[in-house]
Amino acid sequence: MPEPISFRGQLPALANKTYFNYGGQGPLPEASLEAIVAAWRQIQQLGPFTGDVWPYLERISAELRQRLGRWCGVAPQRLAFTENVTSGCVLPLWGLPWRAGDQLLIGDCEHPGVVAACRELARREGLELSELAVGDLRGCETTAATAVLERLEAALTPRTKLVVLSHLLWNTGQVMPIAAVAEALRQHCSQAWLLVDGAQSLGSLPLAEAGSANAAAAADIYACTGHKWCCGPEGLGVVVVSERLLAEAQPTLIGWRSLSQESSGNSGFHGDARRFEVATSCLPLAAGLNRSLQLLEAEGSAQARLERIRQLSGQLWQGLQLIPGAKTLLEVMPPAGLVSFTLEAPQQRRRSNSNLGGQELEEVPTPEMLLGPEAIVTALGRQGIWLRSLADPHCLRACTHICTEEAEIERLLEALAQIG
């Protein structure tokens, strides 16, 4: 019997590069690509619009919906398929009942796409925007959680109708106490909705925590994507919606998949989360994402995978402490796989030392010394090492996954040391 292929061995994208961009897009396993192609072939063999094809398509969709329900710790009826996180946030959000003067409280580390949608909603409906500071919480997860809840209590008013907060902050790498925030909102007189951007959490953090209210189940809108930490195909995501939202929100972008019976022009909308699905989409992608999730499950439990991710991000975080000019955004080892940091070039450090009375030495500056994170990303890319820069805060971000190798982290650290 041949040895089973490891998860990393399924990722051809890692064969010729050192990759740290899982928070942007994860590489697609060979088996997942094969599942997508096989689904397409089967659809063509059955006929793309025949009586024989519909049971097959329903089976693909139902299998993924059930598996994602288990990953999120919710009933499948609370899941709607989307193309990405942004559509998962926006479609239910715009269906909520709003009144002029309602307040939206948005964390200061939210992705620009979600913030832009909230701003446009506020403009159209006459709503007010306010900000919840969380980006400065750079200490341990427990201390950060306490501060978030204290700040939330101080910021909430009777007019607060929505709180927007990511589970794993995409820029600093801090984890937010989503279940505790949801409980605080339930206890508050405003009964505000909770919208959670889960772009960095599905496939990274355990969402279905046994014996306690988990983040996906606790939020009113919890939007995820399959193409980042799940290493699925781009173009397929999922949103978890609460029972309360299903009772009060109306569909927004409407198509035949929103309807309980397509054949009836008088048909009502689905009573479950499918009312936020729209129309024709690429179902072979569901076969690919389902296969990626199966491969991840074979690597261990969600908690075991997180521990491996933390071990690797901790190695990177600790190594950065030893590089002159490097400064991690988090003051402690990361709670997950996002490691954000800045790297001060030698010329910048000499300038700082000179201002303090130190002697400035002459050195021919390289582009990496003169420019910021973007130039460092370019320089590392020339070496086959890939991470990314962020605009706010202006920094570098490297992501470790279960398929990251210790030697790759050492290679990154050595390259950064040469730049710094």
Image (cartoon, grey):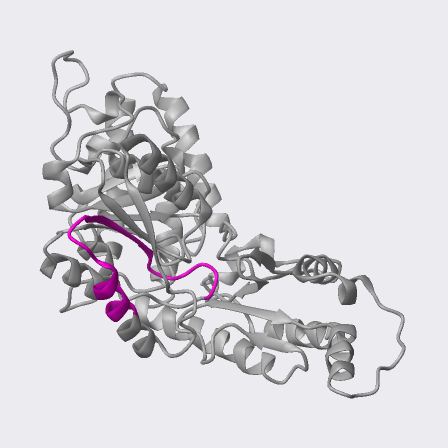
Seen at 75% across and 81% down, the residue is: 355
Magenta part of the chain: 148-172
Q: How many marks?
A: 0
**Does 215 sit above or below residue 412?**
above
Q: Can you tell which quarter of the image residue 48 is in?
A: top left
Residue 301 visible (yes or no): no
Residue 393 in the image, given as x and y percentages of width and height: 53, 61
The question of residue 168 being in magenta is answered with yes
User: 322 left or right of 281?
Assistant: right
**Does 243 sit above or below residue 151?**
above
Relative depth, front residue between 339 and 405: 339
Seen at 79% across and 74% down, the residue is: 347
Residue 185 visible (yes or no): yes
Seen at 12% across and 13% down, the residue is: 266
Image quarter of the N terminus: bottom left
The question of residue 155 being in magenta is answered with yes
Residue 130 in the image, given as x and y percentages of width and height: 33, 52
Seen at 24% across and 25% down, the residue is: 257
Q: Can you tell which quarter of the image residue 310 is in?
A: bottom left
Relative depth, front residue between 262 and 219: 219
Residue 64 in the image, given as x and y percentages of width and height: 28, 44
Residue 414 in the image, given as x and y percentages of width and height: 70, 76
**Does 58 sit above or below residue 150?**
above
**Does 396 sit above or below residue 321?**
above
Relative depth, front residue between 169 and 399: 169
